[in-house]
Image: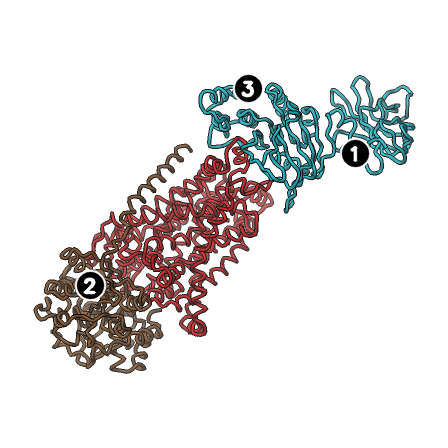
Amino acid sequence: MEHSGLIPTQLRRYRDRGAPDLHLQFGNRQLAQLVSVVLVAVVMTPVAFIIIRAIGAGQEGIEYLLQARNLRIVGNSIALMVTVTFLASLIGVPFAWLTSRSDLPGQRIWLVLGLLAMVIPSYLTAVTFTDAFGPKGALQQLLEPIGVDRLPNIKGFVGACLTLTFVTFPYVLLPVRAALLYSDRSLEEAGHSLGLNRWQVFAKITLPQLQPALAAGMLMVALYCLADFGAVAVMRFNAFTRAIFLQTESFRMDKASVLALVLVAMTVLILMLRSRVQHRGRHYRIGTGANRQLQTVQLGKWRLPAMLFCGTVVFVGVFIPLLVLLDWLSGRTLTNPIHVSMTELLRNTVGVSTISALTVAVAALPLALLALRASSRIDRWLVNLAYTGNVLPSIVIALALVFFASQNLLSLYQTLPLLIIGYSIRYLPFSIGATHSAFAQINPRYEEAARSLGLSARAALLRITLPLARGGILAGLALVFLNVMKELPTTLILRPIGFRTFATRIWSAYDEAFLSSIALPGFVLILVSGLVLIVILRHNDSLH
Amino acid sequence: MEFSLQTEHLTKLFDGDLPAVRDVTLRVQPGEILTILGPSGGGKTTTLRLIAGFERPTGGSIKIGDSVVADANHFVPPEKRKVGMVFQDYALFPHINVEENIAFGIRDQKREGEKQVKRMLDLVGMEADANRMPHELSGGQQQRVALARALAPNPDILLLDEPFSNLDTGLRAQVRNDVRDILLETETTAIFVTHDQQEALSLSDEIAVIFDGRLVQVATPHLIYNRPVNSQVAHFIGEANFLPGEAFGLTASSSLGAVKLFHPKSGPVQLMIRPEAIFVGHQEIGNRASIVWREFYGHYQRLGLELDDGSELIARTGVDRFFQRGDNVWISLQMPALAFDQSGDSTAS
Amino acid sequence: MMLYKRYLTLFVLTFVLVSVFAIPALTDESDALTIYSGRNESLIGPILAQFTEDTGIAVEVLYGGTSAVANQILTEGDNSPADVFIAQDGGALGALAAADLLSELPEATLDRVIDPAFVSPDGVWVGLSGRARVLVYGPETLEAMALELPGSILDFTGEEWRGVVGWAPANASFVSNVTAMRILLGDEETSQWLGDMIANDVQSYPKNTPIVQAVIDGEIAVGLVNHYYLFRFLAEDPDITAALHFFLDGDPGALINMAGAAILKTSDQPDRALMLVDYLLSDDAQEYFASTTFEYPLVETVEPAVDVPSLDEIESPDIDLSDLDDLQGTLELIEESGALD
């Protein structure tokens, strides 16, 4: 049930023989419901607002949508999504296999470096790619001796695809690797014993077993492509998010809402596809696989090509951004006359990310409890609705909130709380998913034991359930923190006047080509993201 | 205080496919060990959870000691019932050590509480393992800690849900005896739930048999075994032969000729004959039979017998006499048979 | 395992501490003057900081594109928190004036600006600095590609310029330029030109600075920008090889435009807002525009700091700045051309 999480976790649910009444398990059930209703109301506000505005646009809205330019946006988004999903799988699957089943030296390092590509914000990757692969960029310099005078500009479709492929391939890598680690080895051994060779075994036995994991990963990539703003904005590729941003920036509410509604509809379609796949698929988990001795495939003469493949992927996805930033640090571009102290940026970014992550974690508690012990249709609906953030790309939430607040809720307009609400709506599902799966892994007998030993429902929650779920909840918290910290469009649109974060600083510096003032914030952002990633990976490893 | 526990018409119905409890009326005396026995999914565990307070009854009432803990108007939450529980999977808190687990339910965390923890560790023989974490313990050790934890707050009743089912067969009998000794030593009123008839017969003062949420029979192990109230109980508990017959008061005619009955019956009946009630010998007493198969177990042997009219019976005898396949033997009944009429009832009519 | 748990606890504690420390930084100063700026922070930010330092009046600045910010004010209407609007072109100011959102400025303020072309006819906005639309080019790149500078902005639709011209279609100065073209050439011809430029693979950039940077890097050969950006690059590195080309008499590529300021009617502190506007017209501030951003100062007492043709010398197309207020029309034209896609 974990949605859009960075790391898919195996859900080890305890089968519950009894059907304990919620009021017994968690004290005041009505309170949990009431809080959930309020939260769901907040979560639903953006969608409701967009639907109302889009309908309000009426005939005009439909005409606007049917303009050839806007229909092209749909085409652009679909083309981007399909291409990137395909390319990301092309990289992700072999990378997963090499880091799980082969005797590739340094598997663990390759894996962590590969995953690092995912935590570098897409706008940062895009900005550095435009420099490295530009007409007169580093790649051209490299090719100059063989007579390449200038390269074609990568901005547009090519650049957007390139960027998103390298940002998203870990979303394929993770589930596929997990499936490879935990798939049934005995089936493969049976295949060998029936006389199939190594390739036949892979094609006929391993690959079919990977299908659910691969499909889940591909859908994740597709969703990411639809929702991503940074890469398409930097590459000036007119996908939905960029078009919506341009309309939002100019405060053209109706046009933005019409486009947003179509984008949401597309996302819902993809998610429906995904839930169908998940129903058929199995849950998976990642980890070192220390608990099982895996037979590794000897690469032999393929070892060098394999190293070269992983090396290239990691070099492009991780080291090019870092090297370009390093290059900019030397300051070969115009000096930004606006000095913003790193302390201020760090404090603002970490501060707002922390508050948002904590807010989301607390908000997720009653919903996760409700999800765990849903005993009525209302409960289940509340939980499902709380997952609305999953179908709303950040830009959509941001535009709805900024318009809503500027018209109906002036006291929140251009304030920090609105920004935090924006983040929270988007990332609440991450936290509910993490908390719910952490709860679901706890034997419900623990709580009953505590109750029969004299603890009240609330005391049992505090002394047993929460401590046991702590790891999972914290991993969810870290995940939200990571995403908020990188978040660009929400921050750009909803931030209070004068409030700067790493993301906005990088964005405005890019806007005016003050490349040297991108470097330091970029480095720090990648560094902090890397640390948080390690925390999340550690938690996942500690599960087994 | 007459009873430690009383339930009256206790009923719990679920929307889903969870096992229901229907109209269960039970009485447990202080210090008694009662076992709720029945097939899986028959509502045994639900009954236990109702007593513990984990479920709210749909109807009926529960009284623990002198206080009503659940009826139409009252519902006392589990933490106020003074009921201890040992779970099938033990449910030891994984984040705290053995000592802390045992101390968990003790209100007085000071000197008296510490003494109680020591007593409990001593009682279950886990003094040396006080500081270990649950996952470091074997199944049997976990079982003992779970027992100590449940007993530590001196509960009025101890509930045990299939407590031995997760243990190896070899270990099971030993742990069962240990637990019985501890319960007797602490004079604890205990209610077990099990689907294992051996366990129920060997451990209990009384057995309550539940089928499909309904209480079918409450009696001592001896009576449950020898005088099951209906054929369902008879089939469930122990091994039995069933022979068709025609009853006339206290006798019935059957393949074995005229058979004495416990209770007067009339008309067509099924006769229940326990394998050990059949005497098998070489002297010409009773009916002739041939041995179709034989299983030797060391301290007893099982014999498959075929009568002249083709009826088959199983007999269990001591190992003082030697039999082998193909032997012609003579069999006779050592005690009256129990007759079930067509509705499956064995009680007097 | 235990160690890992302790590590997590530490992590959470740090989190909480940091957030607590962060909160004071996040509370806003509600009495600060709220400025909506269509001018880039790098151009106007330093002088606003100087204003705060000199007067003690705190400012909060929302930065965005001029037309976007103007549209935001229009949408916010009576709810707008803005006190002062600083625009990068006259069109946006004209649009707000037309919506009757601007309050009248005193004579003394308006009189500071010598050229009446840079003052609102209704007295609701005033120019702060002037700039010329020019072509920035890389001589080396041109030479390598055997290209010659064109006589008119209209020539860039020729095949030889395919893929090597840069523009910033969302930028207000460019938008003004397009408005001027509409007046000179008519909507149809302007639209045609926009379409032909896109068909000729014109390269889009978010703002002017990246265009100049791209020309310096040799990524493109020429770019349509305001005149002062190159001087900022030259000030840091005199060795860069890029130069400016002013279009000839009457060409739609030649245009003098201005940055200006206005006070919103909704301002809750109009007095301090006026102090800011007057400050920006003071000799000090004008000197800043002249010597730091390399624009044309608009007051009599300050002269341009760099060697540029005087405003009079540049043969601006025969248009009145106040004619440039059909902002919405131009934006739609640009949007429909697909230049923003």
Of the pair C70 and C148, the residue shown nearer to us? C70
Q: Which chain is red?
A: A
Query: Which mark is on residue C273?
Result: 2
> Type of residue at label 2?
Ala
Q: Please tell me how crowded label 3 is: few (under 14), some (14-19), or many (20+) other residues with Cα within 10 Å.
A: some
In the rendered image, which quarter is residue B59 located in?
top right
| Residue indicated by mark 3 | B123
Image colour for chain C is: brown
Q: Chain of mark 2?
A: C
- Assign a secondary structure to mark 2: helix
Spatial separation of the CA atoms under disc 3 and disc 2:
84 Å
Query: In this rendering, which labeled residue sits more in front, label 2 or label 1?
Result: 2
Visible residue check, residue A75: no
Dot 1 or dot 3: first in sequence order is: 3
In the rendered image, which quarter is residue C264 located in?
bottom left
In the rendered image, which quarter is residue B280 located in?
top right
> Type of residue at label 3?
Leu
- Assign a secondary structure to mark 1: loop
Above-or-below relation of A522 to A81: above
Spatial separation of the CA atoms under disc 1 and disc 3:
41 Å
| Residue indicated by mark 1 | B230
Q: Is the C-beta separation of discs 3 and 2 under 8 Å? A: no
Q: Is the C-beta separation of discs 1 and 3 under 8 Å? A: no
* Relative to C116, A508 lies left or right: right
- Residue C14: image location, x then y, percent: 33, 40
Q: Residue at x 90, y 28 (%)?
A: B251
Image colour for chain B is: cyan
Of the pair C266 and B311, the residue shown nearer to us? C266
Above-or-below relation of A336 to B343: below
* Relative to A262, A482 lies left or right: left
Query: How are the residues colored?
Result: by chain
Visible residue check, residue C320: yes
